[in-house]
Image: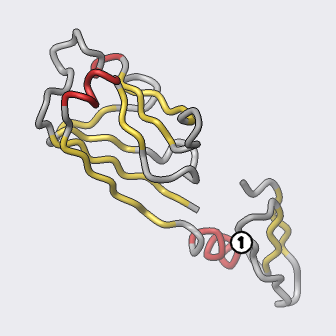
Amino acid sequence: MIRHITITQPATAVPFDPTGTNLTATNMQDALLQILSTLTVTVQEFTLVQQDLDNGYVELNTTNVVNNSVNLFIGRLAFFQNVDFILTSAPGTGKLRITFSGNLASNQPEAPSVGDYLRVTYWTI
């Protein structure tokens, strides 16, 4: 996570290291372009099986998800982080786990069923 952006004059930008916490650029536009160039939108899709429902979660194939960038859909319905699902790190694997809660909990009318198509989009660094 970038914690500090330094804008320098004249145009002598230091290359951006996405693993660092500081960014130096010649202007705010350059700084934003450097940040955005490190992000990737990822779509991961699941056809839910009974084991997913029994577990109450699915796991993404990544650990480097940008905070608050996860969007979850079942069919055309959108579900919301910290309302309908929570994100945690899976023990042992470190993968990001989406645990069903709220309206996605097993006893709710909106709860997923076997065969439902779940689409997750998120940003990674």
The chosen color scheme is secondary structure
Query: Is disc 1 placed on a helix, strand or loop?
Result: helix
Q: Which residue is mark 1?
A: 28
Q: Kindly identify the residue that appears in the image at 70 percent across and 73 percent down.
A: 31
In x, y percent, where is residue 90? 53, 35
Q: Kindly identify the residue that appears in the image at 58 percent across and 53 percent down.
A: 64
Position above or below: 7 against 20: below
> Picture quarter containing residue 81?
top left
Identify which amino acid the numbered label 1 is placed on: Met
Which image quarter holds the N terminus? bottom right
In x, y percent, where is residue 92? 59, 37
Q: Kindly identify the residue that appears in the image at 59 percent across and 62 percent down.
A: 125
Q: Nearer the viewer, residue 71 or 89?
A: 89
Residue most extreme to the left: 115
Residue 90 is left or right of residue 77, and the answer is right
Position above or below: 53 against 105: below
Q: Nearer the viewer, residue 48 or 14?
A: 48
Residue most extreme to the top: 107
In x, y percent, where is residue 66? 56, 51
Q: Kindly identify the residue that appears in the image at 44 percent across and 52 percent down.
A: 61
Residue most extreme to the bottom: 11
Q: Nearer the viewer, residue 66 or 47?
A: 47
> Picture quarter containing residue 7?
bottom right
Residue 22 is left or right of residue 2, and the answer is right
